[in-house]
Amino acid sequence: MGKAFQIEPADTTQSHGEGARKVINIQPVTRIEGHARIAVHLDDEGNVADARVHIMSMRGFEKFIEGRPAEEVPRIVTRICGICPWQHHVASSKAVDGCFGASVPSAGRKLRELMQVMAHINDKILHFFFLAAPDFLLGSDSEYSVRNIMGIAEKSPKLAEKVVQMRYLGQMMMERFAGKAIHPVAVVPGGFSKPMVESERQELLAGSRQQLEFARYAMDFAKSRVFSATDPTTKRIGDITTGFLGTVSPADGSLNLYEGLLRLMRPDGSFHEFSSREYADFIGEHVEPWSYGKFPFAHAWGEGFSMDLEQPRGVYRTNCLARINVADRIDTPLAQAELVEFRSEFGRPAQSTMLYHRARMIELLHACEKVVELLESPDITDPRVRDEVWPRAGRGVGCVEAPRGTLIHDYSTDESGCITRANLIVGTTHNLAPINMSVKKAARDLIQNGNVDEGLLNRVEMAVRAYDP
C-alpha cells in the first residue's frame, strides 16, 4: 500500500510552469510543523518544468493586532506558531520594550534568554527525532504508514523511550517555572513577571544537566547511525547555493540565539552586519501571486530577486545551518568542538541542504550547554527582574533566533501605547525562496521521463523537512 499522490492535467491548477502539461500534487506534505502542498509540473517528456511549495494558511496577525494595547500583543502572537511560541513571545516583548523605551534588568534578561533557549532544546529534539529521523532510520522507501515516530518506537524502543522522556522533561521544566510551556505569558514589558528562587534554580539545573547528557548521546548517535550511514544521493537532495542570515555576538562574532547583530552573508562568505532596527535597509520583501507567503531577499546586494536555480539573485537562508555558517565561533566548548569538525569537513559557508540536520544537532548541544551556563549564573535569582514601563508613542524592533530562523517583530505605537503598524518576518518566511529552490532541484534530479513513485516523492519532501518549516 502506498501513499496517495495525484497527477493532474496542468490546466486544472491555479498556476503552472511554462511548458508544463501535468502536475504532481503532494498534499499534505507530512512531518513538517505547518501545512503545505508541493506541485511538481511536468513537461511533455515527463521531466520537471517547475516545482512550487504552496503554504496553505494565511495568518494576518500584522493587521489584526493594529489598535491593540501593545502590552497585550506578546500574549497574542504566541498563537502564530504552536512549536515556537516562546520565540514570538520574547521577540514581541522586545519590540514593545523598544516602543515604550523600557530597559530590562540583568536577571530579567537572563530569564528571558533562559526560557527562549530552553524552547530551542525542545524544538530540536522534536524535529530531528520525530520529523526527520524516520527517513534516515527506517529508509526513505519504507512504507509511509510506519515511516514516523511510531515506526522508530517499534524498531528502536530504547531510543524512542529516551527521546520522549527528554521532550517531556523539557516541556515540564518550562511549565513548572513559567506557568505555561505553550502560549506563554511570563515575559512582560520591561522584564520578566516573576523572579527565580533558589529551589527552582536547583531543580531546573538538575534537569538541564540531564538534557546536556542526552544531547551528547544524541550527537554521537546521529554521527554514527545517521550522517555516516546516509548514501551520497540522499546527501545531495535539494542542494542549492545561497547566502545566509543569522545573529552573532558583537564582541566576538559568536553564535547568539537571543540578541546581537544580524549578519547577512553572501555565498562567497563576505557579509554585511547591522542591528535589528536597521533590517529594512538590508532585507526586502517580495510577493509572488501564487503564494500567501512573503519572500524576503537580500536587498542590500542590489541584484533584485530570482529563484532561478542557475542564477539565483538575492536569495539567502536562515535556521541552524545559516547560523553556524555566519558565526565565527560558538562560545560553549562541546558545540565549538563540533563546529570545528564540521568546518574541517564541509568548509564555510557549507551549502548542502541535508547539512541542516547536522547543524541542528550542533545547536542542540549548544543550547543545552547555554542553559546550564545561565542557571549557574549567580545573579539569575536576583529578585529585580522588571523595571517600570509607561505606554507611549514609539517604534520598537524585537529580534531573536527562532528554530526556523531570524524572527523579527517591528511595531509602532501611538501616544496611548496602542499598535499603529506592525511588520513581522518569521523564520520560515526567510526560507520560502530556498525551500522552493531546493524542492525544484530535488524534483529535477529525481523525477525523469515520467518515472515517479512514492519513494521518490518522499525524497522531494525530505528537501522541505531539512528546513523544519
Image: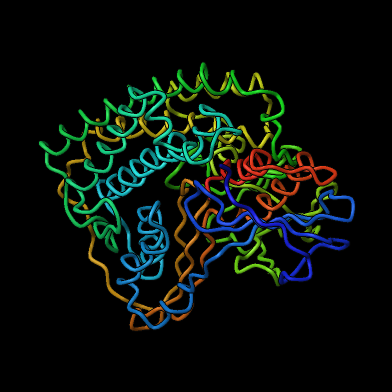
At x 49%, y 67%, the residue is 410
Spot occupied by residue 35 in the image (x, y as percentages of width and height):
52, 58
At x 57%, y 58%, the residue is 36
446 to the left or right of 275: right
* Colour convention of the picture: rainbow
| Quarter of the rendering occupied by the N terminus | top right
At x 76%, y 44%, the residue is 441
Spot occupied by residue 69 in the image (x, y as percentages of width and height):
32, 78
Compared with 185, 127 (above or below) is above
Spot occupied by residue 429 in the image (x, y as percentages of width and height):
58, 58
At x 52%, y 28%, the residue is 138
Between residue 384 and residue 244, name the one nearer to us: 244
Compared with 288, 213 (above or below) is above
Compared with 59, 266 (above or below) is above
143 to the left or right of 66: right
Q: Quadrant of residue 455?
A: top right
